[in-house]
Amino acid sequence: MSARPTDIMIKCLGSFIEDKDYVYHGLDSLLPQLAMVYASLYLKKDFIYHSVAEPFLTDPNQVMVRPSTGDPYSEQGNIATVTTIDAFDIAAKGKMDLMYFGTAQIDEEANINLTAIGNYDNPKVKLPGGAATAYLYPIVKKIIIWARHDPRVLVKKVDFATGNGTTRINNNLKTILCTNKALIEFTKKGPILKAVLQGFNIDQVVSNTGGMKIIVPEKVDTINALNEEELKIINKADPNGLRYEENYG
């Protein structure tokens, strides 16, 4: 079985976890869940694994993804249970190092929209809402966003700012976007293309936005497809391929 863009996204998401990081994923976060497994078992990162399912210090060898990442049976071998409310307190104290966020829209200032497409009072699409996004997004040290590389998603300005990226950028907090085509970092200069996923080129990345202008530096890396060992680790945690149902490729 060869690696697909979805698998390379997982590799991208997991690559930002460092030793001693406090890492948290929320609901509907299957790719981040697998990225945390990848970072632990392949990259050998020693970090605090916590999630919305509320297990604390999960054993990555015992992660088995389910349709809901809020399912406590998907993450076993934990030493304790730490509630979501406690996680918010940890973030408020500046002790949460990395958190993952999905988004329906993201703009040049890293504002994300999980609320509504179109006018807020009369939206074209009412989205599920941001849960704790408005609270957590501006304060967590590293935010890694995953999204489809699509003109409807990568926009000039979001229709509604559920999460305030402008505050993050002004405070020099690392803000990264992993799409199914590219790795982009948000800075005070704007979004900068750091790498393309293997199988894609720069033109496919910069031309496939809805107004977001992506800065292309002289050097752009390539995130290579996963090798057999990397895929084996991910497949063990996701033997039924639930990750592909999100249609990232």
Image: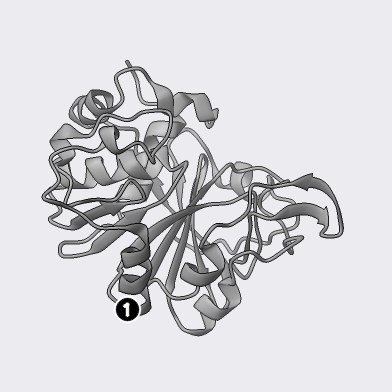
Q: How many discs mark residues in the rendered view?
A: 1
Residue at point 38% right, 68% down?
Answer: 88
Where 39 falls versus 213 (above or below)? above
Residue 87 location (% of width, % of height): 33, 64
Which residue type carries mark 1?
Gly
Residue at point 59% right, 64% down?
Answer: 215
Residue tagged 1: 94
Where 189 falls versus 122 (above or below)? below
Residue 145 visible to the viewer: yes
Question: In the drawing, does residue 247 fall left or right of residue 183?
Answer: right
Question: In the drawing, does residue 141 fall left or right of residue 38?
Answer: right
Q: Which quadrant holds residue 41?
A: top left
Q: Nearer the viewer, residue 186 or 61?
A: 61
Query: Going by the picture, which residue comes out furthest to the bottom?
Result: 171
Residue at point 34% right, 73% down?
Answer: 89
Residue 121 location (% of width, % of height): 86, 59
Q: Secondary structure at mark 1?
A: loop
Residue 249 visible to the viewer: no
Query: Going by the picture, which residue comes out furthest to the right?
Result: 122
Question: In the drawing, does residue 197 fall left or right of residue 123?
Answer: left
Where 219 falls versus 235 (above or below)? below
Q: How is the image coloured?
A: one colour
Q: Which quadrant holds residue 115?
A: bottom right
Q: Which quadrant holds residue 2?
A: top left
Q: Nearer the viewer, residue 208 or 45?
A: 45
Where 97 falls versus 51 (above or below)? below
Residue 207 location (% of width, % of height): 69, 47
Q: Quadrant of the N terminus?
A: top left
Circle 1 packing at 10 Å, graded few (<14), some (14-19), many (20+), is: few
Residue 158 location (% of width, % of height): 72, 61
